[in-house]
Image: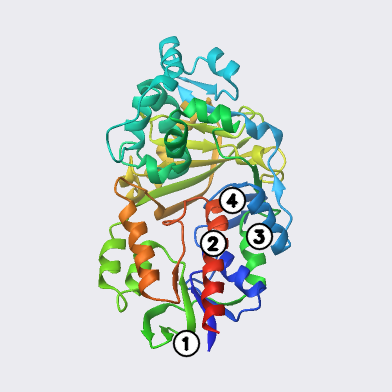
Amino acid sequence: MIDVLVVGSGISGLSVAFLLAKEGFNVLVLEKEEIPGGNIQTEKADGFILELGPQTILADKKVEEFLQLVGIQPEYAREEAKIRYIYKKGRLIPLPLSPVEFFKSPLLSFGAKLRVLKEPFVGPSIKTEESIAEFVRRRLGKEFLDYIIDPFISGVYAGDPESLSVKYAVRRVYELEQKFGSLIKGAIKLKALGPGGRLISFNGGNHTLIKKLAEKLSLDTENVVLKIRKKEDRFIVDAKKGKYEAKSVVIAAPATSAGYLLRDISWSASEVFDQIYYAPIVVVHVSVEKGSIPKGFGFLIPRVEKRKILGVLFSSQIFEKRAPEGKELLTVYLGGSRDPEIIDYEDEDIFSIVDKELRDLLSINKLEFLRLTRWKRAIPQYTLGYGRYLELAKTLEDENPGLFLAGNYLYGVSVADCIRASYSVAERVKNFLRARG
């Protein structure tokens, strides 16, 4: 009998499996696709390294510790990647990185800057839960929402701040108000507001991490899991290639897939998890001539600017060797919850939009399309009332000893969030198995 059967080989499933295997447990990972990694996929074409999913990982101390355990050396972002732009009224404006830069920046009007200074004197909301938009308008003002928070939310969630919950989508910000009564006061006391860490990738792209983890695990690809049942003190897992018995099961699949697999354990899970909305994203990789774009990480476009493009990364400027000599690689994002219909556009229509807007936004005359990727269910949206999904996950685990859930719909959407959460999930699995004996 297998100690732990993990369903899904995205970063969550592989990380949990790796930590448990390192403790000596017998772990098997089942993956329905031919290539592991979920949305973390990398392609190489004509000297370009194309990230089809997440472009970077924000590595804090815990993530760095994990990479050391795996035995993989990260590649750190270039210094110029610290420069990030917001598009406003026909120009790219650098995002200020200090209070002095903030007050000198043309990104916000003088009145909006004064409104930000009033933030420490804003009282708490009478609501039990607010959207990010409500929270920011209340504490920092509408202009701050439009030109800083809205594009930031597009960059992280491809989401709409009007519908995302501040409590669940940006928990750190929510907790600053709860603990200190003010974001500015909290940032001063903690000496930071945003997440800490360094931007990393790996030699050859982010899928290098996936391959390194897969090499260290028992992984069976193209093996679709069909059903999971609880029988006395074990789980019976029916899959395309056979039947498996396991002491414990970790379902590290997207929410809808998790709900489907849990249908014989809990019908409510299937019905409720199916309601979690995943924003669709279109990713377009474009080659341009070297020297035709400014130095930096890339830029985001606020919704009030009424563009189709959500943002553009200057991928070849973030990490070394992402484009051949004389070329630059751009990664363009469209869709998200603000424009989900674009996922169904014809390729030619999407290319036409990108061509027109890039020429306008960056004054580029010559560009070449390399790749178009569609993610119909890309990023889970932590919407208002999202706590009910987290409560259901906990109830399912409590009522079914040996069952564990993992994934970016539970503990945060970033790769770093998933790696950090894997420690907690693995610890709970380990404690269960050792208590069982």
> Residue at position x 54%, y 63% from top?
37
What's the mark number on residue 424?
2
Name the residue type under label 4. Answer: Leu
Q: Image quarter for residue 153?
A: top left
Name the residue at 38% across, 40% down. Answer: 166
Looking at the image, is 306 positioned above or below residue 288? above
What is the crowding at mark 4: few (fewer than 14 residues within 10 Å), some, or many (at least 20)? many
Residue in the image at 70% along x and 37% along y: 78
Among numbered discs 4 and 3, the one appearing first in the sequence: 4
Is tag 2's residue or tag 1's residue first in the polypeptide sequence?
A: 1
Residue 95 point in image, percent of width and height: 55, 25
Residue 89 seen from this side = no
Quote the CA–CA distance across marks 2 and 1.
25 Å
- Residue carrying label 1: 244
Query: How far apart, in angstroms, are the residues tagged by discs 1 and 3?
Result: 29 Å
Examine the image and state in which quarter residue 66 appears.
bottom right
Q: Which residue is mark 4?
A: 50
* First along the sequence among labels 2 and 3: 3
Q: Amino acid at mark 3?
A: Thr
Tell which of 373 and 149 is nearer to you.
149
Mark 2 → mark 4, Cα distance in angstroms = 32 Å
